[in-house]
C-alpha cells in the first residue's frame, strides 16, 4: 500500500515538478550578466543558453539512470557513495554543506532584497535611501544588505520551525515565478518585432559591431547560465513518486529540460524587445518591464521577481538547514551526535539548521564585501603580469556550481565501469556526453574566470582539509 501511495504521479505532473524545481531566479539575474559578457551580442548569448541547457540535459539523463537503479537512494551524495565510495560521498556532502548551499542561498537573499527595493522605490520614489537609487542604492546600499540578512533569518525560521509552511511557500512561489517569465517572453517578443522602434531587430544587429573574438565571451557566458540551470539534480529524487518511473522519469527530464531551455531563451529575447542592449547591460531587465508594460504593471512584475527569488532562496535554505544533519546521519562530519539531533516538536534538526544559518552569515559577509561593495577590488597582486588579480576574490554564484560539475565526473566514470547490466546507451553514451559537458563547464570556467579560479581553489582546498580533520568517521 505504501508503494501505491508513493507512485501516484504521472508524466505530466513529473514534467511540472522538473520545471518548477529548476526555474528560479537565475534567469532574471544572469540575463543581464550574459549581455555584459557578450558585450550585447544577442546570438552569442542565445548560443550560451543553448549550450548550458544541453549540458544540463545530458547530466540529468545520466543521473536519471542512477535514480532508477538505486531506487532506495536519494540525492547526489548517495549516488556518489554507490558509484565511487563512501569517502567521496562524504567530501561531496561536506562541500555542499559548507560552500554550495550557503553561497547560493545568500546570493538569492541579496537578489530578493534587491528586487524588493526596486519595487518599493518605484512605488514610492521619495523613499529615503542612504545611497540614491540612481547611484545603485537598491544594489549596493546598506538597506539592501540589511534586508538581505532579514530574508536569510526569515527563511531560516520558516524552514527550521515550520517545514509545512516552507512547503506551502515553495509551491506558491513556483507558480508566481512563471508569470513574469511568460509575460515578458510573449509580449516582449511581439513588441520588439512589431513596435515602431523594432527593438529586437536593432539589438540583434549590434552583434556585428561587438568584439571579433567570441571564444572567451561565449565560455564566460556558458558559466553564467550554470547558475540559472542549477537545481536539476533535485529532480532525480522524485522517481519513487512516479508511475512507471523507468519510462516516465527520463521523459519528464528531457521534456522538462526542453521547456526550461525554451523558456529561458524566449525570456532573454523578450527582454531585448523592451530596451536597447546598452540600456539592459547598464540597468538590467527592470527597464524593459517598465517600457513594455508601463509603470504600474512593469513594477508589479518586479514584485513577482522578488517573490520568485524568495522561493528559490527558501528551497536552498532547506538544504542549508539539513546539510550538517545529512552528514551526521551517516556518522560523519563534526559532532555527529549534536548535529544529528531532531526536535520532537518541529521534527527538524535544529542544531544543523543553526549551523547552516551561521554559514550563510559568513558567506553573506564575504559576498557583500567582495562581490557587491568590491572592497578588495583595489588590492592587486601580480601587478603588471597576466596574473594580476584581487586576492581571494571570486564569483560565488558560479564557481561553486562549476565545482559540482567537476565532482560529477568521477561519478559518471564509475557508473560506466559498474553498470554492467545497462544498455550501451545508458552505460556509455549518456555518461560520456555528461562527462564532455561537465569538462566543457570546467574549461569555460578556467577561461572565463581566469585568476579567480586560483583564489577559489585555495579556499576550496582549505575547506576540504578542514572537512578531513573534523570528520569523526574516517573515510
Image (cartoon, grey):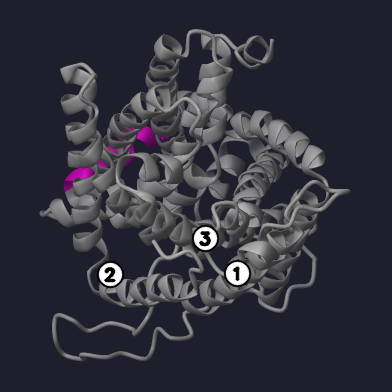
Residue found at x 66% / y 55%: 321
Residue linked to disc 2 = 453
The mark lying in front, picked from 2 and 3, is 3
Q: Residues within 10 Å of mark 3 (few under 14, many from 20)?
A: many
Determine the CA span between mark 2 and mark 1: 21 Å
Between 307 and 192, which is closer to the camera in this rendering? 307
Q: Give the main secondary structure, helix, strand or loop, of the magenta stretch.
A: helix
Q: Is residue 436 above or below residue 398?
A: above
Q: Residue at x 24, y 74 (%)?
A: 451
Please give the range of residues in magenta: 197-208
Whether residue 275 is visible, yes or no, is: no
Q: Is residue 36 magenta?
A: no
Q: Is residue 224 left or right of residue 294?
A: left
- What residue is pinned by disc 1? 359
Asked which secondary structure carries label 3, the reply is: loop
Q: Mark 2 or mark 3: name the one nearer the start of the chain.
A: 3
Residue 40 x %, y %: 31, 50
Q: Where is 262 relative to 122, above or below?
A: above
Label 2, secondary structure: give it: helix
Q: Secondary structure at mark 1?
A: helix
Residue 59 position in % (x across, y down): 31, 34
Which image quarter: residue 453? Answer: bottom left
Q: Which numbered circle lies on residue 35?
A: none
Residue 375 higher or lower than 52, as above or below: below
The N terminus lies in quadrant: top right
* Quadrant of residue 6 within the rendered picture: top right
The residue under label 3 is 332
Amino acid at each position: 500500500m505504501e508503494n501505491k501511495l508513493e507512485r501516484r504521479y504521472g508524466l505530466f505532473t513529473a514534467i511540472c515538478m522538473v520545471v518548477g524545481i529548476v526555474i528560479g531566479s537565475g534567469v532574471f539575474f544572469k540575463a543581464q550578466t550574459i549581455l555584459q559578457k557578450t558585450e550585447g551580442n544577442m546570438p552569442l548569448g542565445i548560443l550560451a543558453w543553448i549550450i548550458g541547457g544541453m549540458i544540463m540535459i545530458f547530466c540529468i539523463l545520466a543521473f536519471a539512470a542512477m535514480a532508477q537503479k538505486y531506487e532506495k537512494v536519494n540525492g547526489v551524495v548517495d549516488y556518489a557513495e554507490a558509484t565511487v565510495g563512501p569517502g567521496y560521498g562524504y567530501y561531496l556532502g561536506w562541500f555542499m554543506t559548507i560552500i554550495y548551499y550557503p553561497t547560493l542561498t545568500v546570493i538569492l537573499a541579496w537578489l530578493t532584497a534587491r528586487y524588493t527595493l526596486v519595487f518599493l522605490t518605484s512605488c514610492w520614489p521619495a523613499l529615503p535611501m542612504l545611497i540614491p537609487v540612481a547611484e545603485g542604492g537598491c544594489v549596493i546600499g546598506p538597506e539592501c544588505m540589511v534586508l538581505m540578512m532579514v530574508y536569510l533569518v526569515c527563511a531560516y525560521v520558516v524552514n527550521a520551525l515550520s517545514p509545512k509552511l516552507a512547503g506551502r511557500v515553495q509551491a506558491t512561489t513556483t507558480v508566481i515565478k512563471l508569470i513574469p517569465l511568460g509575460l515578458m517572453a510573449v509580449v516582449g517578443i511581439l513588441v520588439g518585432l512589431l513596435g515602431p522602434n523594432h527593438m529586437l531587430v536593432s539589438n540583434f544587429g549590434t552583434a556585428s559591431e561587438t568584439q571579433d573574438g567570441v571564444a572567451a565571451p561565449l565560455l564566460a557566458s556558458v558559466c553564467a547560465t550554470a547558475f540559472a540551470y542549477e537545481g536539476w539534480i533535485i529532480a532525480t529524487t522524485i522517481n519513487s513518486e512516479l508511475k512507471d518511473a523507468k519510462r516516465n522519469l527520463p521523459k519528464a527530464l528531457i521534456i522538462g529540460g526542453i521547456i526550461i531551455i525554451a523558456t529561458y531563451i524566449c525570456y532573454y529575447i523578450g527582454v531585448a524587445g523592451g530596451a536597447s542592449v546598452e540600456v539592459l547591460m547598464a540597468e538590467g531587465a527592470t527597464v524593459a518591464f517598465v517600457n513594455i508594460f508601463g509603470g504600474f504593471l512593469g513594477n508589479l512584475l518586479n514584485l513577482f521577481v522578488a517573490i520568485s527569488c524568495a522561493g528559490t532562496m527558501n528551497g536552498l535554505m532547506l538544504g542549508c538547514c539539513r546539510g550538517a544533519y545529512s552528514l551526521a546521519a551517516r556518522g560523519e562530519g563534526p559532532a555527529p551526535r549534536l548535529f544529528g539531533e531532531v526536535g520532537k516538536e518541529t521534527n527538524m534538526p535544529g542544531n544543523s539548521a543553526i549551523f547552516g544559518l551561521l554559514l550563510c552569515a559568513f558567506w553573506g559577509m564575504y559576498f557583500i564585501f567582495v562581490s557587491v561593495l568590491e572592497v578588495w577590488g583595489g588590492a592587486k597582486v601580480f601587478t603588471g603580469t597576466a596574473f594580476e588579480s584581487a586576492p581571494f576574490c571570486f564569483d560565488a554564484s558560479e564557481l561553486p556550481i562549476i565545482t559540482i560539475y567537476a565532482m560529477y565526473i568521477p561519478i559518471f566514470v564509475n557508473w560506466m565501469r559498474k553498470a554492467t547490466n545497462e544498455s550501451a546507451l545508458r552505460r556509455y553514451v549518456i555518461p560520456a556526453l555528461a562527462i564532455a559537458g561537465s569538462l566543457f563547464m570546467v574549461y569555460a570556467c578556467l577561461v572565463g574566470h581566469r585568476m579567480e579560479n586560483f583564489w577559489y581553489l585555495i579556499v576550496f582546498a582549505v575547506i576540504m582539509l578542514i572537512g578531513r580533520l573534523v570528520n569523526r568517521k574516517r573515510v
